[in-house]
Every structure is written in C-alpha cells, then in structure tokens.
Amino acid sequence: MNLTFSPEERAFRAEVREFIATRLPDDIRRKMQAGDHLEKDDYYRWQRVLFERGWIAPNWPKQYGGTGWDPIRRHIFSEELSYGWAPRLLPFGLSMVAPVIINFGNDEQRARFLPRILSAEDFWCQGYSEPGSGSDLASLSTKAERKGDNYVINGTKTWITAAQWADWIFVLARTSPVEKKRQEGISFILVDMRTPGVTVREITTIDGGHEINEVHLENVEVPVTNRVGEEGGGWTYAKFLLEHERTGTAGIAACRQMLTQLTELRDREDIEDRRFDERIAEVDIELTALAFTELRVLAAESAGTRPGPESSILKLKGTEIQQALTELALDAGGPYADVALARHYFNLRKATIYAGSNEIQKNIIAKQILKV
Amino acid sequence: MNLTFSPEERAFRAEVREFIATRLPDDIRRKMQAGDHLEKDDYYRWQRVLFERGWIAPNWPKQYGGTGWDPIRRHIFSEELSYGWAPRLLPFGLSMVAPVIINFGNDEQRARFLPRILSAEDFWCQGYSEPGSGSDLASLSTKAERKGDNYVINGTKTWITAAQWADWIFVLARTSPVEKKRQEGISFILVDMRTPGVTVREITTIDGGHEINEVHLENVEVPVTNRVGEEGGGWTYAKFLLEHERTGTAGIAACRQMLTQLTELRDREDIEDRRFDERIAEVDIELTALAFTELRVLAAESAGTRPGPESSILKLKGTEIQQALTELALDAGGPYADVALARHYFNLRKATIYAGSNEIQKNIIAKQILKV
Amino acid sequence: MDFTLSPEQVLLRDSVARFAASHPANGTRPDYWKTFAELGWLGVGAPEDVGGFGGPTETLLLMEQCGRGLVASPYVSQVVFAGSVLREAGRTDLLKQLVEGKRRFAVAYEEPHARYDPSRVDTQAQESAGGWTLHGTKIRVLDPSTADTYIVSARSRDEGVALFLVPATSANLERSAYPSEDGHDVAELRFDGVRLDRDALLVRAGDGLEVLEAGIDAATAALCAEALGLCTVMLETTVEYLKMRQQFGVPLSSFQALQHRMAEMYIELELMRSMAYFAAKTLEDETDPFARKRGISAAKAQIAKSGRFIGQQAIQLHGAIGMSEEYKIGHYFKRMSFVERLLGDRDYHLRRFVELTYSAPREAVAAAW
Amino acid sequence: MDFTLSPEQVLLRDSVARFAASHPANGTRPDYWKTFAELGWLGVGAPEDVGGFGGPTETLLLMEQCGRGLVASPYVSQVVFAGSVLREAGRTDLLKQLVEGKRRFAVAYEEPHARYDPSRVDTQAQESAGGWTLHGTKIRVLDPSTADTYIVSARSRDEGVALFLVPATSANLERSAYPSEDGHDVAELRFDGVRLDRDALLVRAGDGLEVLEAGIDAATAALCAEALGLCTVMLETTVEYLKMRQQFGVPLSSFQALQHRMAEMYIELELMRSMAYFAAKTLEDETDPFARKRGISAAKAQIAKSGRFIGQQAIQLHGAIGMSEEYKIGHYFKRMSFVERLLGDRDYHLRRFVELTYSAPREAVAAAW
C-alpha cells in the first residue's frame, strides 16, 4: 500500500499549476473568485488555451486528441483547475457526447464532430430530460419519425444547461413506439441547433440565474446519418453516458476552495464562535473523508477496475458537502448581508437533484452494491 | 384560545403531587432515581397505594372503578407520577386488556377480571408478537382450535414484557385458517398463566436486564368463555388496543426528569463546554415543542376528538428524545464511567422499536394524515 | 387549556387569508398599507385606546396567513417590531399614528459584526445644547424605504443604550437600500453626524436595550408564525405535487422513501406549529423579561431548524421544477431562508437560550417554566 | 497511490481473520497472549531489532480483523498504546520484553474531570533521595488486571508532565477494577504515596505529554481500524437479516425506506474506511506532531459519528431481535459504543481539531495538509 503521490505526479501537478497561473485570463479568474456567472466567451477563451496546450480532453483516447493521462493525472489536473480558479470544462461536448461518439459512432461522425469539440468551435448541450420524465428517463416521449433519409423530431426537452450557447444538441428520442420495455426503441440523435423548428426558451432559476432552458423541437428534420449507433440502441448509450457523468460531480477540490472562502468570510465577519468553527470542522473532516474515498476509487481505476457504483458515494456526499458549505456561508453572512451568498445557496440546491438525484443514488447503492 | 391551566387544574396538580410525595415508599423512589430495575413487589405496593386512593385507573369509565377525570387531569396525573419518581402503572392490565374487556367483553368477564386488575391481584402481560411477526402483526401463526367448550392453543409469543410476573396473558390466535384477508379469523383470548402447557423463557437484553420473555403455548386448553368479543373479531380489538398504546409512549414528563438528571450529571462531571450545553439545549427545546404538541392533542381530545394519527408524532419524537437524552448522558459520563448510564442507553434502543416501530409510525403519518 | 379560536379570531384569520389569496405577491412588494389600516390590521396588539385590538395570538393568526399567502409586506418590521417598541416606550401618541397608518417606523439596531446581538452597539449619541448628534452604522434595517422615521439604538456616554427617533430625511444620514431576494427592501444606514432635536429621545440611556429586546422578541414571534404559514404551504404543495407527478408508471408519492420524508416534514411542521403558539403564549403570559427571552429563543431556534428542513426538502422533492423561478415553491423556500435567519439565526438563539438557562441559577429557571 | 496489499500484509490479515473466526469472544475475554506473541502480533509496529515488523498499516489490518471478529483483547491498550509510548521513550529494552510477551504494560493517564485531555494532570510525583512518591487518581485505565506495570503520567514540581513505570503490585496503590459492558477490564487507580525507585522515571518532566500523546494517537488510529471492522460486520449482518426476514409477505429489504437507510449506512462505512486508512497514513507520514494530532482527531471524529449511526441503525433495523443478548448484533453495537468514546469522543476530537486548525496561523495549516 502506497498512499502518497509519486515524485513524477508531484512534478506534473506543479506543471499544471504553473500553466493555469500564467495562462488563465485574469478577468475570468476574478469572476470565478467572486462567484459571478460566466459568459460563453469566458468558457471559449479558456478552452482555447487548453486546446492549444493539448490538455482539453483528458478523458479521451490519445488518438482522438486526448492526453493519454492515467486516472491519477486526470485527477490532479482536475484538482488544479479548481485550485487555480479556472472554469470547469463544459462537459456536454467533451465528457458526454464525445465518449458516445468515440465508442458507438462511426468514423465519419468522429471525423466530423470530435475536432470541433476539441477546438471549442462547437458548443454542445444535452437533450435528455423532458417535462414528464425526470428520474424516470425511459418515460421520454420525444418522437423521431423516419421520413426517407431524415428523422422528423417532435418533442420538448427541459432543464438543459447552456442550450442558449449551444451549436448542437444530442437528443434521446423514440424511433419506434413503446412495446415491451420502455427502454427499447430509443435512439441517440445529434441535432444542429440552427435547424428550423428548434427553439430555446430561457428558464430563470430561483437564484435569478439563467443556466437552464427548455428546447422545443417542432418538425425538426435531421439526416439519419446524425444518429449515433444502432436505431433503438440509444438507451445503452445513454446509460454509458450517465455513468461517466456521476464520477465528475463530487467537486472535492472546488469544495476545498469554498471552504477557504468560508474561513475568510468568517474572519471578515469577525465570527469568534467555537460552535461555528466546529460546524466548519465537521464539513472539513467529511470532505477529507470523501477526498480519500475518491483516491480509493481512483486507485481502483488505475488498477484497471472501471468506475463502479461506488462513484454514487462521491456524487451523493460531494453534493451534500457543497450544499453544507453554501449554507454555512449564508449563516456566516446572515440574511441580506451579501446577495451573492444567498444566490449561491439557492443555486446549489440543484446539486442534489441533477445528474441522478441523491435519492436515485441511494437506490443504486442499495441495488447494485448491497444487492437488496 | 386559552393556553394555561385553570386554578382547579393547578389545585388538582398540587393534590396529586402531595399524595405522591407522602405515600410513595422511599425505597421505590430511590430505585427510580437511580435507574434501577424494579421488582414485581415494588409495582404491587405502589399500585395498592393508588388503588386504595381510587386513582389506579384514570382512563377507565367511572362505573368500573375509573376516576372520571377529563383528559387534562389524566395528563396532569401522569406528569406528576413522573415528576414524583413513581413507577409507571404497568399498562398490560390497566391500559391494554381492560379497555378491550370494557368495550368488547361481556358482563361476566367485566365482573371477573376488572376488579382484580384494579386491586393488583392479577398482573397481566400481552401476547401479540411472535418470532415470525413483528411489525406485521397480522402474519401471526398461533392457533386456537375449538375442542368442545375449549380452545386448544399452540404457538409462541415473544418480546413479552413482565411475563415472568404475570397471572394472565391475552393472546391473539387464529381460530380459523387464513382465507381472503390475513386480518380475519383472529380471536382475542385470555389465558391463565398457570394453565398446563404455558412456559416462560427469559430473554436477556443487551443491557443485561430481564424485562422480556418468550411464552410457549403447547396444547393449552382454555374455556371458550375466555374469548373476548366475537370469534374472528380479534383484529378489531387488537387495533383498538394499539391505538391506545401509542399515546402513552411519549413520556414527556419522564424526559424532563432525565433532562434534570443530565444537567446534574454535567455539573458533577464539571463539563464546562458550551457545545455540550447547546446539545442539551437542542433536546430541551425539542422537548418543549413536543410537550406543547401533546397539549394540543389533549385539548382536541377534551373537545371531544378521539386521539387520531397525530399521536404518532408523540410516540416518534418522544422516543427519539428519550434516546437522545441517554446518549447525552453517556457522552457526559464517558466510556466505562458509570455502568448504569451505558445500560440505560442500551436499554432505550428499544423505544424506537416497540409499540409500532418509528418506521411504522412514519407509514401511519404518510397514509393516514398526508393520504399518500 | 383550549386551542379553539373565538369568533373574532376566526374572522380576522379568514379576512387576512382572503386578502392574501387575492393579492399574491410572489417576490414583489405591493404596498397595501391603506387597506391594512382600514381593516384595522395595523392595530393588532395595540391597546384599545389607540384603536388597537388583540394581542400576540391575533398577530400569530394574521402572520400565519401572511406566510401562507407569501405576502411580502413590512408588517413585521413596521407594525409588530416598531409598534412593540413604541408601546414599551409608552408612546401612545406615536402608536396611534402608526395604527392609523399616518406614520411608519423602521427599527435600526443591528450593527456590522454584531451578529444579531442588540447589545453590541457602537453608534454614539452625543448630547449637546440643542439636542443630540448621531454617529454610527446600522445594517439590515428592514423596510426602510416606506418608513418616515427610524428608531435607532445608540450609546449615550457611559449610560448604556438609548433609542432615538430619526426622521428618514435627516441630513448626514446616508441610506444604501437594496431589494432583497425575497421581495423586501433592506438598507444599511450611516449616521455621519445626524443632528436631532432634544425630543428625539424615545427611550433614555440605560433603558433602551430592554425596550428594544421586547420589540425584537415580539417581531421574532411574528416571524415564527409567518414561518408556520410558509411551511404549511410548502408541505401541502409537495404532497400534492408528488401525488400528481408520475415516474416509473406510478405517482412519486407511492415511493416509501419519499413518503417517510414527507412524514418527517409533517412532524417538523407540527413542532413548528407548537412553537409558534408557544411563542405567542410566552409573549402573552410572561411579565419576566428573562422568561420571555428564553421562550422566544427556544421557539426561533426550533423554527429555524424545522423551517430549514422543510424548505430544503420541499425543493428536493419537487426536483428540477423546484429550481424554476416560474413555480411557486422556490419563492416560499427563499422567504423561509431569510425568515430563518432574520432577527437571529439558530446558532444565535441556541446560544441565547443556553445563556439564559444553564448559566442562570437553577432555581430561577425552574420557576420560569 | 496504490491501495493494494503486499503478500505479507495479506498473510497477516488472513491469519488474524482465521484466529478471530475460531475464537469468538462475544463479551468474554479469553487471554490468548501467548499465541499473539508466537504469531508475532505483539511486534506489529515495533522496530525489527526488537523482533517487530510493519507499521500503522499492519496495525490497521490486524485491528480491522479484531473488530470483525469481536476479539476482546488488550491489544490496543497493551501493544499499540503502551508499545508506542515505550518506543517514543526510546526504551527498546522494555519494548523487546513486550514484543516477546514477557512483560505487559497498561497506560494510566486520564484523571477525574479531565474529559480525555492528557494535559490535565493533577497526579503529583515528589522527588526524594531514593526516588519518587506518587499521589493521585487515574480513571478508565484499560486492561490493568493483566498488566504487570503501569505507565503513569504525573507532574513533577513545575517542570511539566513526566511518565513513570509503576509495578502493579506496589504498596499504597489501590486498584478498583471492574468488568466493562463490552468484555474488557477497566480500573480506577489510586496512588496514595506510592514509592518508586529512581529508575522508575520513564520520560522526564516536560517531555511526558508529547510521548503520551503520540501513544494516544497511535491507539486512537487502532481503534478507528477496529471500528471499521465492527461496522463492516454490522452492515453485512443487517443487510443479510433484512433480506431474509419476511414481513407483509415480502422481505424487509424490499422496503425502499429501509433500502435507503442501508445505503446511508454503506456511505458512512465507506467514509469510515477512508478515515481509518487516513489515520494510518497520518501516523506513517507525519513527523510533525501538530499535523499528526490534527489528522488523528479528524479520523476519530468522523469514525465516532459514522460508527454511532451505523450501530444505532443496525439495532433499529433488526428490530426486537437486535435487543436480545443472544443475538450477535447487540455485542457489536455495544463495543462500538465504547470504541466511539474511548480515548476521546467526537466532541473532544472536534474541539482538538478546531484548536489545531482554526486557532493556528493559517499558513501552518495549509502546509500541514
């Protein structure tokens, strides 16, 4: 058992840290530190910097432009992005649709879509959830009817992050009516957002922000060649994608940053209260436990094990800790003290809902790990 | 809205307090204060004192020896028993079987059983749970087969408090095989513990105490006249009994006593720790909220409403608070400090399990109050 | 012991409920002050000789309905809080004007870093020939924009805390007002040598703190009642939504884990209800400030905890739709988040309760209950 | 970063597991000390030159299995705790005897009202011509009956805390031993003028506390590993029981509310596992006592919380049978209840963590992680 980072890994960390410190635009760093919403251009500029360095796609195979890093290096890179106040890499193209295209798409699709995701020329968004289907994704009702060489898509997708910026959306749609299993007859289709019939409606969230949207698809015609994989095979690809998503949501390094900001806030507010310090300590300690849990998952991954249902813990506790930290910050600031604190608290209520609600994660743990 | 006790009620409280202070035997009071287990004789002596005063059966109709008190007076009496360190009135005869006999028995049964319960000549125990049926009472398998004027009972009842002292047990048994509904074909039968075929086996609990037992019934013959109510009507009587039981388990006054002992312990142990004081305060406040909730239930009862599913809250929170208090006491004393503290903590783990586990109470609230 | 309402109380409750239902105010702040005055609501808790009626129970009934209807009005700050301070200060003249809706007062007592504690006052009142001069800063002043007069706590020499009446239009008074996330207006006030007449003194130095705390406690009890109304709606809405919303071919409400969560919300709601009533009873019964403070802190600490749980779970159980500004649950949640912390959060009230309970002689506490 | 075990570690773990499985000790305390010595287990963590091997990771593996098997042995107190103290004190001679099973030591450091804090020492050591005289009281001394020597903390004049070796048979030493509820022996020791030779001084005044704390931290890490073993069994047993136990015609494990509870237990167990490893890593890596104490307190605080939850839920989900002495779950629960509090409960370690973290200069903390 060797529970420390190797000298090579430490050197890698230093290299990444130095790169971010020198190359991340100052105005973006300041926005991140202040908790401001970013614009599309902020993401674009930063992704271009990483693209030019060859670091934009840590989890892609090397042949398609990935970095070839092992799980530990990917972890270090991701930590350093947080510690350096860099924006997260928008996952919809890089971490969601790209692995599906790589694993289940054809060569033509790979050649067409992957380079433009790498270069940030194309921004993507996901078209999974519908007004009638939340945790129960398989109940979706968006239809894609075959008409010659095209699909004609009709339906509504909702809670779609960054749809207002996206050039493309990947859509789960029914290509044949529900027969025995609701999971059958679903296909995974790529849609250009500029196609006639695609409209985006903003959804304002309770923190006053505009991150999510409703996307209406009305007689949207897309070529059949935009379907990834088999017709009716979409559920398999969707599940593959969701398992990838779960690992990415613990945000432990980001929590460490929030914790640092929290203790600074406490000092600014002159809170000399052992009870408050102990409440911080409780979260601090739990975060340490979760960070070490993440290392155990990573070590297993390095040893060749695919990330399993254990990653549900990371999602579940990670989001609980994020919420606990925003709550402590709001308590530190008090009511009406700082609008940004309240907004952050309101905004992060989403964390235990999205990417498989925490209730769904408990179902997964019970069924897949405890086998009940 | 008038949320205070009337002068008459306050005078009544003073009278009860004075009576307990002067008439409760000192040795019993000391045992109660020390948290020692009581002997049968302790219960007997105290119940005789109350019997002679006419205060032994506050919740019986006056014609059978009840006190004729309204719900508020019954509440005051019950509080004062706790505040005065009096033993609880063993409920199996007085509060469980007696109301069933009164409501569903015949005159002969009333004449035969009630006076001996009042006078403490007969101690009772309950025969509900079985090794295979806990929360799911209707799955019971004890059988009572008709043989002439007798029932022949076979089965095992378990987790039976005070069976080692009991003269009588009331048993739920199947008098006909399960047909459509499992709740049908169950009868409510009174069994003399001296009947041949009745054996009692002690169960030691994790606190080292002996409160509960297993009772084996092997070809136990009892006359059909020992059945209360209709043959096959037992489920109705059982449910009636359980609803009575739920109200009695909040133990708020007893919690107040525990809280007082806890602060004394804290002083003896010299715990000058605001965090610990705040942990006590959290329980103290919740107890205040629960006590006020009990008053609301009582007021509704006084206004003629039967105690409804709201009493599930009293059971649920009351037992959680009891456990929180034993936990705080154990924390105050520390490991190995005082065996009695640990035993009390271990013993009271039962509180959230018995009388309908707290999970069952949540089911009741969801179904009967929230109607989901 | 009788929890039934008198016919007058039922009337009051129902008329507030009707108003709230027909004037939804999700996040906006319509100013219906004139209506309030006409309906007599500005007089709830005030003595009859100034046109008032009722007491803490009536305030509870009114505020619970305001909570249910999410009425974002300055009622707590300008009627309950300011009204209690004026009553304690014995100023029936001003109270009468308040009840008639002719004058409006906002209390400014909290200071930077005071963390809710009204005794931490750095604002100075210097006495001079013609009157007083104020220097200092007040934060989180509630609903200042519609007030014509501020009631301001300040220290006068070494004689303790006094309270002053400060015209909102005073020179050298800087107001940084901003709309809060829950539809109220809030301000920071800076007194940079504000000159006051001699009769601006509302409560003399040394007595100000007790008067102020009486007002804070009354307002806190009103917030507890508002919280009860907010949380009642949040639970009702959640239960309805989960019964209606289908997933996996069945209503969400059929999942036991969610049923138990709703049962836990119900339990917390009933504890809140008890403590909201307890707070009203405490105000009504307790002549001893010690017992009053202790009871109010117990109530607010419980309500902050229960309200936080109910609010967070309401959003969680709604799922994504709960995050949408278009849907009502988020607005109730946000208001509850502020009510939870206004005039003292759970930590503050727990600490205050501990100080009043375990630091005090045991006998005094026993007597106080 | 590599969590795989070496072949030697696997061997150790498996042999302890086999021993534990064949020597169930539910509540009783068989004394297999000779076997432990022969198997080399008394040398885990000791230097090779006294016959030892391995370090904190090996202790973790051993103690986790002891937890799983509910082995009630004096291993933590007499090997990990006393052994660490002797090693820190540089007494390889005594350590060798310990490893060989020839001598057995119990550490006596806690005093009435000290609330786990080893620096709160009132026991006095007076120096005289021939040696030392001890006066004082020690509580919660673990496994004293099988020890021949006590390691006792005492103050010597104003020079701070020293450690002394005290023969168990000393005159004027009164031992009130009692069996604990979880199958260990515990005692209060009263030193009423116990006379000691000059060479009874193990660690001189001023250095005793640091040596003692190193021992406490090592023993605390071992308790964390034991807790992990205990809770692993409690979760496994609960899951199995709920799968088997039928109610309402279906297994209890099919109820979603109970499934979620078990999922929560699993999460807590995984956090415990991480913190047990983290504690071992902390002991292994940290040469700075400041960082070591901080890491150990973080681990114990987490493990106390998670262990309490898992234990209480294990009983609750078992229902009535969990309350029966005849069934195993209660014994695991009881042991966990003591482990949770031994050598410092959650409150103590949270406070220690806070003092070491937020009271210290920020830079030092950042560097320490």
Image: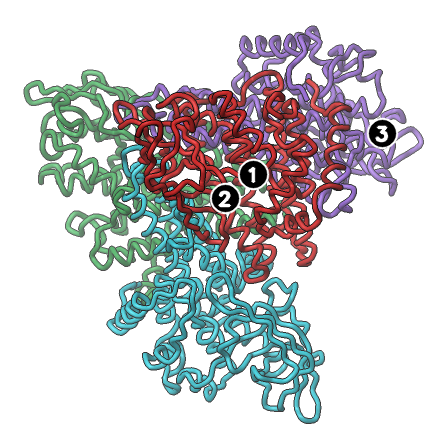
Chain colours: A green, B red, C purple, D cyan
Left/right placement of residue C329 relative to residue A13 reads: right
Instruction: Report the residue marked by disc 1.
Output: B90
Quadrant placement of the C terminus of chain A: top left
In the rendered image, residue B358, in percent from the top left (x then y), is placed at: 45, 36
Quadrant placement of the N terminus of chain A: bottom left
Q: Looking at the picture, tell me which residue is in the foreground, B290 or D198.
A: B290
Mark carried by residue B162:
2
Disc 1 with disc 3 on a shared chain: no
Q: Residues within 10 Å of mark 3 (few under 14, many from 20)?
A: many
Please name the amino acid that badge 3 sits on. Answer: Val
What is the distance, in whole Å, between disc 2 and disc 1 at their CAs?
Answer: 9 Å
The residue most toward the bottom is: D130
First along the sequence among labels 2 and 1: 1
Disc 2: which chain?
B
Left/right placement of residue C128 relative to residue D143 reads: right
> Comparing marks 3 and 2, which lies closer to the viewer?
2
Q: Are marks 1 and 3 in contact (CB under 8 Å)?
A: no
Please name the amino acid that badge 1 sits on. Answer: Leu
The residue most toward the top is: C38
At horizontal 44% and vertical 83% (from top left) the residue drawn is D98
